[in-house]
Image (cartoon, helix red, strand yellow):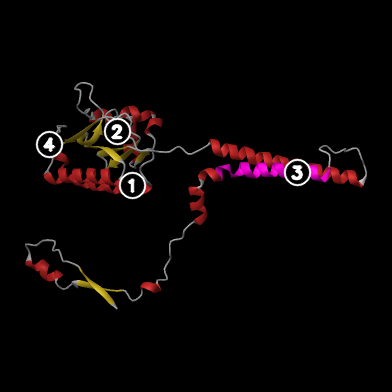
Amino acid sequence: MEAGTLFRPIIPLKPQRTSRRRCLSSFPRFIRVSSSSQGDYKGPRPKREWVADWVSKNDGTVRSLPIYVGGASLLAVLFNRTVSGVALVADASRQNLLSGCLCSQSRADLLTLGLAVTNILAGLVWLSIRPKSISTVHPQGVECERICSDLPDFVTSELLWAWESLSVATCCGSLIILYDNKCVLQVGFASVSLSSEGEAMNVDAKKLIQGSLCQGVTKSGSQSYLANLSLYPGKSDLPFLPSNTQSVILQPLGDKGIAIIGGDTIRGFTTSDQAWITLVGEKLDATLAKCVDSLPTGDTR
């Protein structure tokens, strides 16, 4: 049974040419959608992990479970020794059959006591070690938007598109793009300038490119992800970023540029984000390469 018709509008690539419209007119203008097989779907269905869901919802109980098991085992062993009338310490000097049985039971009880104590200690360790919660921080700095003044309009719009896309889809809070030894874009949060209070610190492109971080990325030609920026000594190469920047991605733009992306969360960039940022970097490199000769000496607006 036909549930409906989804119309697909035809958008000509060059509306001013009538020949393009004629070529596109031969394609179908609609797609018929059938709903007769809604209940006959036999493809893979999402599998729900009931055990994993229960453990995640009862984290405290699961961490305390070894303590309960160990304590119950310890009490059971002591109760068994009391009821059976066996002494806590068996006389190992007796050589008869009863003496051998008592010694065997004592060894089994000692082994059970050791396992019970091990369970209790494991539960205490589980309770003392908990994963540190990672939260988003607010960048300590000022907002700025500096773009090279002599860039063509299509380059400026693409740079702003990259910034808006990264800031919305990822934890990006700062974006700096260097190309041909010049800073063509500084947008987002930045640290406060020491010379003029209330303004963002300028990016010294030449000094930054000569630093260890940029030199390593330039030589390798691959993306560098600093998941926890506070652990890296190269943080001193990025004084223009807010002091509490949590993570940074250094993305090379071909052989002449590099994009510095600052995040507000530790390990906030996922593997999908990193792969997508690599593609965005290739697109920006192709765009900036068209106007590399017309780039100014670093003036921004």
Q: Position of residue 27 (x, y in %)?
A: 18, 72
Please provide the residue range marked out in magenta.
62-85
Residue highlighted by disc 4: 149
In the image, residue 131 lies at what x, y percent? Answer: 48, 39
Q: Which residue is mark 3?
A: 79
Quadrant of the image containing the N terminus: bottom left
As shown in the figure, which amino acid type bears the numbered disc 1?
A: Asp
Of the two numbered discs 3 and 2 in the rendering, the one whose residue sits closer to the viewer: 3
Q: Secondary structure at mark 1?
A: helix
**Left or right, residue 264 beside residue 18:** right
Q: Earlier in the sequence, mark 3 or mark 4?
A: 3
Query: 279 above or below 19?
Result: above
Tell which circle, 1 or 2, labels the residue nearer the N-terminal end: 2
Foreground tag (1 vs 2):
2
Residue 65 in magenta stretch: yes
Q: Position of residue 105 (x, y in %)?
A: 81, 45
Q: Is residue 40 above or below residue 279?
A: below
Residue 150 is drawn in which quadrant? Answer: top left
- Residue at (34%, 42%) from the top-left corner? 223
